[in-house]
Amino acid sequence: MSSILTRSIQLLLSVSILVVVHELGHFIIAQLFKVRVERFFLFFDPWFSIFKKKIGNTTYGVGWLPLGGYVKISGMIMDNNKENQSEYPIKDWEFRSKSAIKRLLIISGGILFNILLSVLIFTFLLFKYGETYLPTKNVKYGIEVDSLGEKIGLKNGDKILFVNEKYVPYFNDIPKSILLGNSITIDRMGNIIKLPLNNKKKKILFDRKELNFFIQPRVPPIINYVIKNSEAEKYGLRNNDEILAINSEFILFSDQLKDLLSKYKNENILISINRNGKLIQKKFFLNPKGILGVYLKKFIDLDQIFLFEKNNYSFFESIPHGIEKSWNVLKNQVLFLKNIFHIETKAYKQIGSFFSIAKEFPSKWNWDIFWTLTGTLSIWLAFLNLFPIPSLDGGYLLFIMIEMITKKKINDKIIERWTIYGFLTISLIMIFIIIWDILKVFFY
């Protein structure tokens, strides 16, 4: 229960930051052009609000419905109660009194501020933590694959040479490149093989509950830690023991250990281990599930075996890398979106609402992950708001650009009508996604 609460609080805080920054973009540029902002709200407030206070011409508040937020800008849409526009003269502090380019900038403010927030977050993270990568050339034992990796044609020990006929310099980027690519070129025991990635194979990868890694670097079987009260603790296995053999069968890699444990379920076995350079053997009864009761080290824990690259940046060096990071995050999300429209891939199953986003946050508070996800959501929010759908920023931008091209202002009633249609459409899509997210828990 505590993990659900922690994830929910992180999501709420992240969304609050994104909404406030987005609306602040509209607000600041509107104020810059001396346009009056009547309301500035975090979350929506139908019927009532949790808090509100009027300062100057603007009422600031917090609504009760945490699905976004809004600013109400004076004169964005003509008051339809007035039959004759002359009865409602244009004021110089209204949105509609400003030139098309100023209105365009006011509407673009939210998008620009979300882009800026994403860049600032990634710039700060790079400045504080730097970047740690595992170069592909340093994955010297090849890869270990799960059942999904095997289904698309990969095998334990394969060395990945190219994805989409391009060399991927860092192993961290290979799983993502495979998800979005069309082919993998591998070295399998000296044989060069090209595996095609058609929609049928991508369906295997996308058609699952979580987009976790299906490949990782192959590693030797070294115990990370022994689970308390487990069989491994009972028979005296220790952290950092390297498992060398079971019975007379030698083991070099973790995947081989998993295969042998499956083979010797419910039997007495002899385990040979390397403990600080000493060979130790222990008799062991393996339970019917074939579980030792240990967690093995992952590649990230084995920096004495794998040579990682760490890039540290000064503050000014972090800025262009922060921009690049935001761009790469957006580019990958757009490529994933493209796969969603290929029904055969079943990538649409990975679409989720706030419930799915909440699961991406860690069960224990981690500021590094929190800000990384917030930066990712910020650039994604900026992109989504560019869609030319009425009620989104992109819809208003479309109307203004049509006006700039035709030199004629679109009737306010038409804009209002299409804005309502756009709002209803987006609301229905959101409701559908939320229902879909809930159904996935029970049927997917």
Image (cartoon, rainbow, N blue to C red):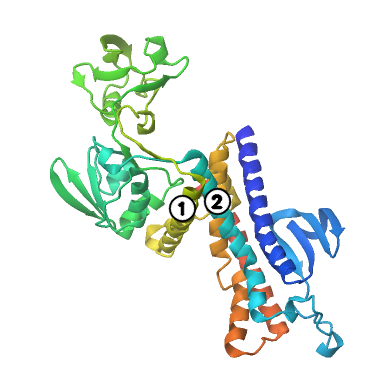
Q: Residues within 10 Å of mark 1 (few under 14, many from 20)?
A: some
Q: The residue under label 1 is which amino acid type?
A: Lys
Q: Which mark is residue 325?
A: 1
Confirm whether residue 109 shows in the render.
yes
Residue 102, x across and y down, in percent: 66, 76
Q: Which mark is residue 375?
A: 2
Residue 218 horizontal side relative to residue 55, left or right: left
Q: Nearer the viewer, residue 352 or 216?
A: 216
Q: Residues within 10 Å of mark 2 (few under 14, many from 20)?
A: many
Q: CA distance from mark 1 to mark 2?
A: 10 Å
Q: Give the secondary structure at mark 1.
A: helix
Closer to the eye: label 1 or 2 = 1
Against 286, residue 80 (above or below) is below
Against 136, residue 402 (above or below) is below
Q: Are marks 1 and 2 in contact (CB under 8 Å)?
A: yes
Q: Residue at x 41, y 51 (%)?
A: 207
Q: Residue at x 23, y 19 (%)?
A: 245
Number of marks: 2
Q: The residue under label 2 is which amino acid type?
A: Gly
Confirm whether residue 44 shows in the render.
no
Residue 406, x across and y down, in percent: 59, 89
Residue 264 horizontal side relative to residue 37, left or right: left
